[in-house]
Image: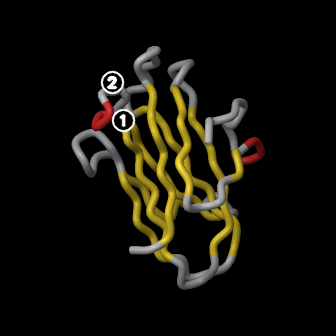
Amino acid sequence: IVEQEPNNSPAKAQRLTPPCEVSGQFFPATEQDWFTFEAKAGETVRVEVFAERLGSTLDGSLTLYDAAGNILATNDDTFGRDPQIVHRFTTLGRFFVVVSSVNEKAAPTHVYLLSASWGP
């Protein structure tokens, strides 16, 4: 899947159906890419950014929110500068994952691949 702009807020979040991969880029610098998906209680989601491992200069960050805007998990660095979140849901609902740039810099080389899948 290719990231679709505008997706810079919860209201404009791009819908995902895990398992999937999304190819994205950060431009302009202050951008955040919002994605949304549905999950059931007891399901575990794994979301991961591949950037540095693919040669990108992006220093990415991930944040997982519930529909009310509460932060459920956040991560900056798991694999070098690439973040990963593994989260088990306790309720049914709509959730959001946000990819952002730690240093709020933008460049043509700030590309990423977001992977979203179910399971541990």
Q: Is residue 19 above or below residue 12?
A: below
Check the picture and name the quadrant holding the N terminus: top right
Q: Secondary structure at mark 1?
A: loop
Q: Residue furthest left?
A: 80
Residue 30 occupies quadrant? top right
In primary-sequence order, the first of circles 1 and 2 is 1
In the displayed structure, does residue 82 sit left or right of residue 29? left
Inspect the image, locate mark 1, and give the three-letter code of the amino acid beneath it. Ala
Q: Residue furthest right?
A: 11
- The image shows residue 40 at horizontal and vertical percentages of 63, 79
Inspect the image, locate mark 2, and give the three-letter code of the amino acid beneath it. Thr
Q: Report the disc number at residue 51.
A: 1
Residue at position x 39%, y 37% in the image:
60
Q: Secondary structure at mark 2?
A: loop
Check the picture and name the quadrant holding the C terminus: bottom left
- The image shows residue 98 at horizontal and vertical percentages of 55, 46
Residue 96 occupies quadrant? bottom right
User: What distance separates the C-alpha of mark 1 from that of mark 2?
Assistant: 7 Å
Residue, disc 2: 57
Neighbours of disc 1 within 10 Å: few (<14), some (14-19), many (20+): many
Q: Nearer the viewer, residue 17 or 12?
A: 17
Residue at position x 32%, y 33% in the image:
54
Q: Please count the marks in the image.
A: 2
Residue at position x 47%, y 51% in the image:
115
Mark 1 touching mark 2, by CB under 8 A? yes
In the displayed structure, does residue 109 sit left or right of residue 36? left
In the displayed structure, does residue 12 sit left or right of residue 115? right
Residue at position x 69%, y 66% in the image:
94
Q: Nearer the viewer, residue 25 or 105?
A: 25
